[in-house]
Structures are given as C-alpha cells and as structure tokens.
Image: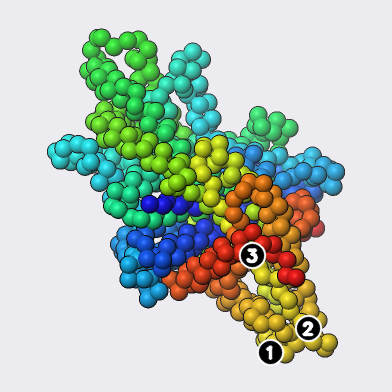
Amino acid sequence: MKIRIFVGTGGVGKTSVTAASAVAAAIDGRKTLVLTIDPALRLRTALGMTDSPREQRVEHESISSRGELWAVLLDVASTMDRLVRTDVSEPEAKAITAHPIYRLMLTSLAGMNELVAVERIHQAIADGFENVFVDTAPSRHAFEFLDKPEFFVQLVSFPLVKLVGRTFGLWKRGLAGIDAGSSKLYGTVENLVGAALAGQVLEFFAMFQPVAEGYARRARNTIRTLSDPKIAGFTIVSSPGRARQDGQYFFDELTRRKFPVEMLIINRLWPAMDLKQSPRVSPATRDLIGWYESVCASQGASRDRAVADWAGKGQRVIDLPELARDVDGIDALVRIAENLQKSNNAASSSRNPQ
Amino acid sequence: MVRPVTVFCGKGGVGKTALSLAFALRQAGEGHRVLVITSHPLPELALSVSLAGLRESNPVAAANLFVIHVDPKEVLGGLVRQSAGSSLLADTVLSSRVYRSLIEVLPGVKEIAFVSRVRDLAVQGAGPEAPQGFDRIVWDAPATGHFLRTLEVARGFDSYLSGPLALLGKSVAGFLSHPSSLTLIPVTTLEEMAVDEAIELCEKLMAELKMRPVALVCNMASPLLGTSDEEWERLRENFLAEVTGAPNASMILERHAIERTLFARLRLAGGIPTHIVRRKPGGTSDVGLLLELAAEMGGLPGARVS
C-alpha cells in the first residue's frame, strides 16, 4: 500500500497534479483512490465528475482492466456518520446524531474537514485501496489535518470529558460536591457564551466521549502510518516563482513533524519559447514575444535557484509544463500523467535547452 | 471617524497579498498612513512577499506602512480577560482544555472575533500593533470560501443568546451591514476556475450580503489584454507568418484567445468595473515587483490618481 499526500500554497494546481498522479496509478493497474480535503472541491472540475455523488468511480479507456480509480470529495457528514457508528450502539449513535450541537458541528464548524480527513484516510485503508492520493487544503491549512487530530486526541484522551460530564451535571443542578475551581470555570464559560449554548455543548461533549476516544485512537494510528516512509510520502507542489521559498517552508514544516518528504513538483513552468521572428515582424508581435521570453527567463531562473537549493535534500524535483488551458476533465489529466512520467524519468537533469 | 477599509478578496493564488501590499505601498508613498491586515501569520507572509529593502528604496512609504496579522484567539483571550474580572481566573480559563475546545467547537467564534478586531482598528485608528496611528486600512482577505464565511458570520451570531459574544456579534453585524464600512475589490487571474469563482463571489456578495464590489481586478494579465479587438485580430492573422516555433507559437495564440474570452465574461458579470494589472516578469527584488504593481493600480477606488 502507498499513500501520497500533496501539499502546497493556493493556486499552484495542487488538485490537478494529485488527480493526475492518481490517474497514472490507475493506468498502471492499481486500485486507486483520490481524496480531496480542500473545501474548494476543484477535484470535481479536474476529473469532470458528475453532479451529485461525492464518491464515484472514474472510467477512462486508458485505465487498465486491473486498475480502478475512485474519486472522493471529503464529506464531513457521511464520514462522521460512519465514525459515530464505529464506536457506539445504534440508539446511542441516534442520540448523538440528533443532538443540536452535532448538527452545528457538521454545518458550521470551521476545521471539521481537517478533523475528519484523517478518519477518511483510515476508512480508505480499511476499504483495501492499494494507492491513496490526498489533495490537501492550501498553505498552512495543509498541516491542520495532521495537527488538529493530535490537539483533539489530547483533549479527549485525558478523563477530561468524563470529568466535565460528571461535574457539569452536578453544577447544573446546583448540587454540592463540585470543587470551587470547576464552579468558577463553568460560570465564566457561561457568562462568555450564554448559559443555554454552554449547557448544550458540555452535555454533548459528555455524550460524545466514546466516539471521540475511538476517533482519537484511530487518528493516532493513521498519523503514525503517514510518518512511515515505506508507506507514505509527501509531495510539495509549487509554482516556478515560489518554488524556492515554498519548497523550503513545506520541507521544514514536514520534517519538523517527522513526515517523509518525497519530491518537489514545480508546476506550470512556461517552456523556453525558442521562437524565431521574421525580419519584418510587426512591433506588436515583437513586444509580445519579448514579454513571453522575459517571463520564461525569469521563471527559469527561479526554477534553477529552487533546484540548486533542493539538491542538498536528496529528494527528486519534477517540472511540469504550463498547459494552454485549464485542466477540465480526465483527458487533460491523462496528458499531465504522461508529462509526470516523462519528467520523473528525467528528474535530475537541468532545464538548460543546450 | 471610521477609517476606510479596502478589501482584496478572491481565489487562492490570484495575488491578493501582493496586490494588498502594492496598493498600500502606493498610498503610503503618497503620505497616507496605511495599515495592512493580513490573515497570514507574519513569518509565513515574509516567506511569500518580503518588504526587505523598502526603507532604502522608498523611505516615505516605509515610514507610513504597517503590516499586522490578526489572530482571533488573541482577540478572544482579551475578551476573557475583560469578562473574568481577575487575571488569575482569566489565566485559569485560558489555560483550561474546556475553554480551548470550546473556541474550536463554537460556530463562528473565531470569525466574529476577527471582524470585531478589524472594526475596532477602523474606529480607533490606532492599536498596540501600530500605536502611531493610521488613516486607512487594507485587508488582505482569506480565500473565497473562508472570506464569505467570515462575512456571513454576522447572520449566525444569534445562536449566542446572551453574554459578551452575543454583544460582539450584534456590533459586528452593525459594522458589516453599513455599506461604507468595506470597499470590496475581488481579484482574479484570467484562468477559467479563478474567473468562475470571482463571478460567483461577486454574485454572492451582491445578492446575499448586499455588498457591491467597487472594482474587479484582473491580475497577471498579458500586455495584449489592453489592446483593441481590431489590433488583436491583426496580430492573430499575422502571428504565425511572422513567428515560427511550433507548438509554442500556437500556444501563445490559444492562451490569448482564452484570456480575451474570459475577460469578456468577467465584464458581463454584474457590471462591476474591471481593472487590469499586467503580469510583471519579476526577477528583481520583491519590493521592486511590488512597486511595479503599485504603478499599475492607479485609478482604483481609494487610490489617489497621481
């Protein structure tokens, strides 16, 4: 099994590169799943997916008979539903999923995507996929799906929620037997957000505890899996102009968290133009060519600096050329997949045209 | 007096941060005192755009420009300190896991906190981050989805029935509903997905939030975009005769045809005036690039035409 995770800043074509890599694996005949946890849902456009189902099989003539490609747009509600039912009995699950705070959590909680992403990766592994490709949210949000579960694990692994469940009930009924510290704490929290809401949230926390513990256990395991270089690898996707800074930033952040960095992809590199102008060329055309050449030269120079910086890290750098139009369907992805293969073979050579 | 807040918003990667800084630089260079509020933590911002060398190349702008990052958790911490009464109790609350999980779980709390800080800065014209004071604000907004959620939060605050958050929610709603509080400038590049997202953003802003953007910036445009249709047709007819080097020559033509189609689509959307910022080859320092961008931003509302 192999899990590949793609990180990068916004607008660098991360989703297309992830989807194209998944297409390449399916062409090679593997049972492949591509999962996007970016709420922008660009995977739908990139894969030319039909409207409604958020999980569907993608068909294409180039995918070998042994291969399979499944595309999944992370769905907080369905992932949570499966999660809740993993750990508690059906009546308890019903009580949890009917609770108003559960509904609020699903619809308006920023960061839910990041929290359930790791559970969805676990589910994909459990479903027996050979290759899992994960498209993350831009920039520092990329790390939230790795950092947040740990924060959550710490929160629930401690008998805190049990404690809240017990002492909160006592306090709500105005009973004695609660220490002064907790009493003041609840008082302040109530003053801050209003008593009704605070009560509901704390009540829900108490009920949700076994689910949270099950989630926490699996999240820990999954994240441990993601730090095993034999199974997982992180790919940094960047644009030519920012490859050096982005590459360094993501490399440092991933290494600090002990996750294995696999490669840097410099996406949408404008090709060296190599154009010849006739002697009677019009000024407008000459200016346009001049502009293209200067943009290309500047991109090439940034790209070369990034490659030089990256040389010491012992990981591959792969260039992908700019395409004339947006990636809008599986045919375009198959073309990128071919380019990936080509660049992969020529990974360490320089871009010098000579 | 409430200081004007200009907001650059749009899809990730279209250049909101660079344009916010360039726009602010332009005004700071003219002697206005400008505060840039970014949603990127500053170390991350410095990675993508560096202001190193500004003091030497443009001392006036350097003296008038302040860049800050607003962290909603700090704003909420301040609120707790205010309402707790004693600093000992505030410390207990702030360090407790119940509090830390509540801020993560309560809907919209971080967004309310963020907007309330923007409002306070606009009203007070000074803050601990910029004690010298400023007379205008540029907000480098988060990417479309999160930005809309931030603006919509004023509608959801009524889940807070009482307490300081409910009060905060009401005052934030008041600020956001005032038409002159925010000057919105969506940004897009001329790529299909970015353009679709920009159009959708403008429609949502106008229909659901009753906020009308004052201009739509087309960033990283080619120099050809400003030419007339006749000039473009003439160039297109002669191009392949004057230039050889397939397939790149035809790729250039195809790109421009697409660029023009997308630009036309943008101009039809909502009738918001478009403003073209041409792509700069780059290569010089970040500050050099920002100053070049700033030169392209004359005529945008809020920018004084020099």
Identify the mark at residue A269; answer none if there is no mark: 3
Residue at the image point whose x is 50% and y is 21% from the top: B81
Q: Nearer the viewer, mark 3 or mark 1?
A: 3
Labels 3 and 2 share a subunit: yes
Q: In the figure, is residue A333 to the left or right of B241?
A: left
Identify the mark at residue B237; answer none if there is no mark: 1
Residue at the image point whose x is 76% and y is 46% from the top: B28
> Which comes sooner in the sequence, label 3 or label 2?
3
The kind of residue tagged 1 is Glu
The kind of residue tagged 2 is Gln
The kind of residue tagged 3 is Leu
* Chain letter for the residue marked with disc 1 in the picture: B
Identify the mark at residue A277; answer none if there is no mark: 2
Identify the mark at residue B120; answer none if there is no mark: none
Q: Nearer the viewer, mark 1 or mark 2?
A: 2
Task: Report, in whole angstroms, how far the alpha carbon at label 3 lies from the one at label 2.
Answer: 23 Å
